[in-house]
Amino acid sequence: MKYDDPTLRQQLAGAYALGSLRGAARARFERLMTDDAALRRLVVEFQEDLAPLASDAPDVQPPPRVRQRLADAVVPAVRQPALRWWQRVNLWRGLAAANGLFALALVAIVGTGVLQQAAVPPAELVYVGVLADAQDRPGVALLAYNHPFRLEIAAKREMPALPGKELRLWIRDRETGEPEFVSALPPGSKVLPLDDAAWQQLRRAKALIISQQAEGSTAAAPGADILYEGVCVNLKQWSQDAAKP
């Protein structure tokens, strides 16, 4: 892994500043920063540039049903007969064995405001793109998750489309370097659901692009209408490559 690659350093620093670089990948990056003052400065610059994303985000209160489900998960409902609980020996054994996992699940519930069934795999951040404008100023972060496939959009400032135009998402193919249209971005959208075809496009992407073009345009490329562009980093692949001797 070439850690002196300026593009890779920028993308990893941006992902670290966003908090989207997690687990072993985050620990590995922190070890790199220990002996790399320039990399530390780059992270600070990204943190300063991206700070408005956090300060401008409104507080979100979980709906009452989430609080009720959380309470039900922690305290058994009164209507359940006590005898039935005492009779369930396997249940108590399971709870004792999974005490640590239950605590982690509880944290996840509070953090996301969503109760998930145990059989559903947790969402995993797979791709990250920190997109910059023509002046190389970071302005948009794109975070691609699986389970289900979706793209979360975090912009430093609003991206309103001009009348008669729309925002569009593109990838730049890793092999050919050619742009491919992925989807239009609804005005004010924060989350874009992705189908299997769009996810496969992300797998081939070396860069992500946001353009502004005429509504209904059949243009096969963004042309000169690019607003933001940035390298697409596969966090899973990067973590695996970095772990190799």
Image (spheres, rainbow, N blue to C red):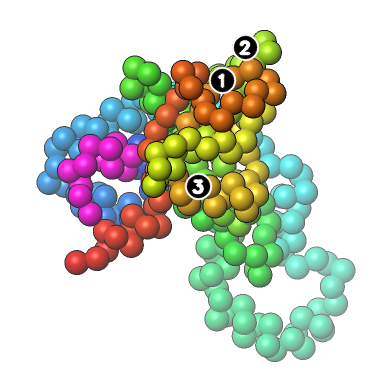
Q: Estimate the spatial distance between the alpha carbons at disc 3 and disc 2, rounded to whole Å.
A: 27 Å
Mark 2 belongs to which amino acid?
Answer: Leu
Position of the N terminus, as image quadrant, is: bottom left
Quick check: 78 left or right of 221? right
Q: Please state which amino acid type lies under the numbered disc 3.
A: Leu
Above or below residue 157? Residue 17 is below
Q: Give the class, few, some or many, for how many residues have Cα within 10 Å of label 1's Cα (few <14, many ≥20).
A: many
> CA gap, disc 1 to disc 2?
8 Å
Looking at the image, can residue 56 be seen? no
x, y percentage for residue 50?
40, 28
How many dots with numbers?
3
Magenta-colored stretch includes residue 207:
no
The answer to which of 34 and 89 lies nearer the viewer is 34
Q: Which residue is mark 2?
A: 162
Secondary-structure class at tag 1: strand
Alpha-carbon distance for marks 3 and 1? 20 Å
- Pointer 3 or 2: first along the chain: 2
- The answer to which quarter of the image holds residue 80 is bottom right
Disc 1 residue type (three-letter): Gln
Residue displayed at 52% across by 34% down = 170
**Proximity of marks 3 and 2: CB atoms separated by less than 8 Å:** no
**Which quadrant would the C terminus be assigned to in this image?**
bottom left
Relative image position of residue 96 (x, y in whole percent) = 57, 80
For the point 51% across and 25% down, which residue is it?
222
- Where disc 2 sits, the SS reads loop
Q: Which mark is residue 202?
A: 3
